[in-house]
Image: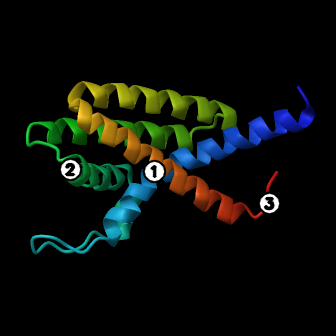
Amino acid sequence: MSTRSVNSKISFSIAFLILSYLFSTLAVNAQSAQPAQSGQPARSTDSTRTPEGRAAALTEKMKTELSLTDDQYPSVQAINLKYALKNEQIFKGSDGKFAKYRALKSSQKDKSREMKAILASDQYKKYEAMTEEMKNKAMEQYKGRSGTGN
């Protein structure tokens, strides 16, 4: 393999790590930008700075986009909170970027497996599309900030 190819793979891995973190915050930003519904005040962006806030916002987004049932909602909420807390620990950990990348990738795989057990097949397909869309938006934001194309 050429050095350029290796550098490209490392850059992609680092970008994926950053994107994984942004993935959890993008859903929150989209939710915060929506107008308040049913007379409740709009969420403050401060509430999305915590794993609990991010999980709550993502659950609300999923409730709308995936048409979660009343039975599914608490399970999805618990899963989102579980992985928001887990991912927060990974980000704050002392491991290197590549170790964090692997841990986040494993975490996302585990989360998807748990979601698949709760969601109906059509909901799960929408969930996969939603996560892919958020990942792509995060990648665009990352590219816009990096300014360099290593």
Residue 88 vs 111, above or below: the answer is below
Q: Which label was assigned to residue 63?
A: 2
Labelled disc at residue 148? 3
- Would you call the spot at circle 1 few (<14 residues within 10 Å), some (14-19), or many (20 or more)? few
Q: Please report the residue visible at 79 percent of the width from the left and 55 percent of the height from the top.
A: 149
Q: Which residue is mark 1?
A: 133
Q: Quadrant of residue 147?
A: bottom right
Q: Nearer the viewer, mark 1 or mark 3?
A: 1
Q: Is residue 112 above or below residue 65?
A: above
Q: CA distance from mark 1 to mark 3?
A: 23 Å
Q: In the rendered view, does 18 fall on the left or right side of 56? A: right
Residue 144: x and y in percent read 66, 65
Residue 80 x/y as whole percent: 31, 41
Q: Secondary structure at mark 2?
A: helix
For this rendering, which residue is in front, 22 or 140? 140
Q: Is residue 108 above or below residue 134?
A: above
Q: Secondary structure at mark 1?
A: helix
